[in-house]
Image (tube, grey):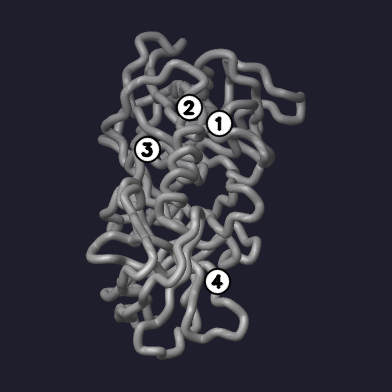
Amino acid sequence: MMFRHNAYCYVAMPRHLSEGRRRVTVFTAAPVVHSTGWVEEPFWEDMDLAVALVRGPVAERCTYDLDVFASARPEARKTGQLVRLRDSGEVDLDDMEITESGYLTFMAQSRDGAALQKGTSGAFLVIGSQPVGMAIKTPDGSETEARFLRSEEIHMNLSRWLERRAGPIARSTPQGGASVARAADTEAEPELPFVFVSAGSAPLTPEQSGENLTGPGAYVYQPTRANRIVFRTRDGSVQTLSGLSVQADPESGYALPRKLRVSVSSGATGERPRNFLVGEVGPDGLYQGRRMPSRARWVFVTILDSWEQGPISVDEIRFE
């Protein structure tokens, strides 16, 4: 089930559905659209729960917020409907009755004795319009029953995880004025000839230096303050800049950058820099900002904080 939190769209899903993969494809009800989801499995080992960050057209259909899971009361003998999605995008509603209600999970059974369809895992049982639990398992030998993870438990674990990810490690500034999208969702333009000059924070190792931002490898550093990274045109000429993208690997084992500020200067030595973009790298490590073109000889990218504690890794900064 999709929900929105801090302008990002997530999907709550059983952990076993991802089969250990970090990417899944998420589909919506008709009219069907699909997007890639980046899967995180941060919860305790025996909890069949994962969460995926989704961008693109699916995210535009993300309407509920996290609190939709908070007020469920799945008690025994209550009846509801299992909401399942067909490949065609049609929605099936199957009547079920809660037969046993536990602390973390509950059991429910088909009211008419009909067998549950394959693909029930991940479907939610709703009472009225309130989701009360997510199907995680069909007991062996039963075709009419399913075990559900309670929605309150889903809410509690997701809330704690999202709050911990959101903790800044440096002073942040307000976001505004920039669009955020997957780099692959936009038509590529020729990269402008900007080269790395310097960074305010030293690399963790010599092999993880700032020069990697415009070449192979990653720039990794231990944040102690906002990190100002400086670029200049290769030949010292003034160029027209209309956008900038940042990419970081969410599977690198390092923290992802979060809020950033970009300024530019057309002066010979970088004097009188002008604000250009303010934005946020997503939890999937992607950011792209565009605006009206501006003339620039120097570009200053300041990383203000990160999604998690620890050394920050940035793979690439590209200019358009």
Q: What residue type is labelled 1?
A: Glu
Q: Is mark 3 on a helix, strand or loop?
A: strand
Query: Disc 2 to disc 3, how far (Cα)?
Result: 27 Å
Q: Do the residues labelled 2 and 1 touch (CB within 8 Å)?
A: yes
Quadrant in which the C terminus is drawn: top left
Which of marks 1 and 3 precedes in the sequence?
A: 3
Identify the image quadrant of residue 197. top right
Residue bearing the label numbered 1: 308
Q: Which amino acid does label 3 sit on?
A: Gly
Residue bearing the label numbered 4: 137
Residue bearing the label numbered 3: 243
Quadrant in which the N terminus is drawn: bottom left
Front: mark 2 or 3: 2
Q: What residue type is labelled 4?
A: Lys
Residue bearing the label numbered 2: 167
- The answer to whether residue 291 is visible is yes
- Residue 18 appears at what percent x and percent y? 58, 64
Q: Is mark 2 on a helix, strand or loop?
A: loop
Q: Residue at coordinates 28% horizontally, 75% vertically from top-left?
A: 30
Task: Sort mark 1 into few (<14), some (14-19) or many (20+) by Cα contacts within 10 Å.
Answer: some
Task: Sort mark 2 into few (<14), some (14-19) or many (20+) by Cα contacts within 10 Å.
Answer: few
Query: Disc 3 to disc 4, how far (Cα)?
Result: 47 Å
